[in-house]
Amino acid sequence: AQSVAQPEDQVNVAEGNPLTVKCTYSVSGNPYLFWYVQYPNRGLQFLLKYITGDNLVKGSYGFEAEFNKSQTSFHLKKPSALVSDSALYFCAVRDMAGGGNKLTFGTGTQLKVEL
Amino acid sequence: DVKVTQSSRYLVKRTGEKVFLECVQDMDHENMFWYRQDPGLGLRLIYFSYDVKMKEKGDIPEGYSVSREKKERFSLILESASTNQTSMYLCASSFRAGRDAFFGQGTRLTVV
C-alpha cells in the first residue's frame, strides 16, 4: 500500500527565514504526490502536486516542493516564511488501490512562523 | 471555483442517535470522499464513491455507511453514534483519478 510519512509534528521558524516541511513516501510504481494546507477551522486547500517532469514543483503562495526519487522524499519549501503561513500542512500520495481514486495522507505538520 | 459544501459546521448528537452528514459539490466531479481528521492521526479515509450508487470502503469504514443517489451529493451516515466517533469530518471531491481533491470546510461532530 502507498503511504507517506511526515516525521515532524511541528516546525518552528522565524519570519523571513526559509522553511522546510518534510515528507517521505513509499509507493510501488510512479508516485503522484501532493501538498495541502489547512488553516484553523477550515478544510484543506491544495498547494501543489508532482506527477512527472521537473523535480522542483512550484505551487500557491510562494511554496515549492522538491521531488527526490533516490531519497523517496517530497519536501515542501519556501524561501522566506510569513507569519500568515502558520497552518497545518499535509503531504499526500495517490493510492493506486481502488482505481487510483484515493489519496492517502500523512499525519500532518504544524508550522508556526514567529516574528 | 469548485465548491464543496458540508451541511453543518458543528453538530452535537447523543450516543445511539442516527446521524447524517451531507456533502454537495457543484463541479460534476465523479469522485467523492469522506475523511475523518483526528490529532496525530491525520486524515483517514472512511468511504469513497467513484460514481452514482457506487461506493468503496476506505481504511476505517466500521460504524459508518454512505449514500450517493445523485452525482453531486454524498452522505455519510453514522448508524448509531458513539463517543469514539467524535471528530472532524471532511468531505472532498475530485474530477478523476490522480487529479486534485477539493475539500469542504469540515463538520466538527461531538457525540455525548
Image (spheres, rainbow, N blue to C red):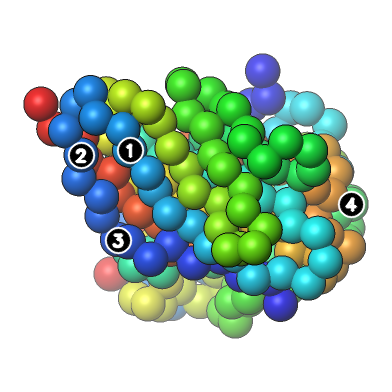
Callout in the foreground (4, 2): 2
Query: Which residue shows up at 64% across the image and 63% down it?
Result: A70
* Closer-to-camera residue (B19/A17): A17
Query: In front: mark 1 or mark 4?
Result: 1
Q: Nearer the viewer, residue B10 or A111?
A: A111
**Residue situated in front as seen by the camera: B7 or B58:** B58
Pointer 4: what residue? B51
Q: Is residue A114 left or right of residue A91?
A: left
Q: Quick one: SS at disc 1?
A: strand
Q: Earlier in the sequence, mark 2 or mark 1?
A: 2
Q: Is the Cβ of the residue at disc 2 closer than 8 Å to that at disc 1?
A: yes
Q: Which residue is mark 2?
A: A13
Q: What subunit carries mark 4?
A: B
Please state which of the two labelled residues, at mark 3 or mark 2, is closer to the viewer.
2
Does residue A42 sit above or below B84 in this rendering? above
- Please state the horizontal and vertical placement of residue B82, each as a whole percent of the image: 40, 77
Give the residue at x 64% y 26%. B3
Instruction: Give the residue type that dot 3 points to.
Output: Asp
Q: CA distance from mark 1 to mark 4?
A: 40 Å
Quarter of the view holding residue A86: top left
| Residue A19: mark | 1
Label 4 – label 2 distance at C-alpha:
43 Å
Callout 4 environment at 10 Å: few (<14), some (14 to 19), or many (20+)? Answer: some
> For the point 67% across and 41% down, which residue is it?
A55
Tell me the kind of residue under disc 1: Leu
Which structural element holds mark 4? strand
Marks 4 and 2 share the same chain: no
**Label 3 is found on which chain of the structure?**
A
Asked whether disc 1 touches disc 4, contact meaning CB atoms under 8 Å apart, the reply is no
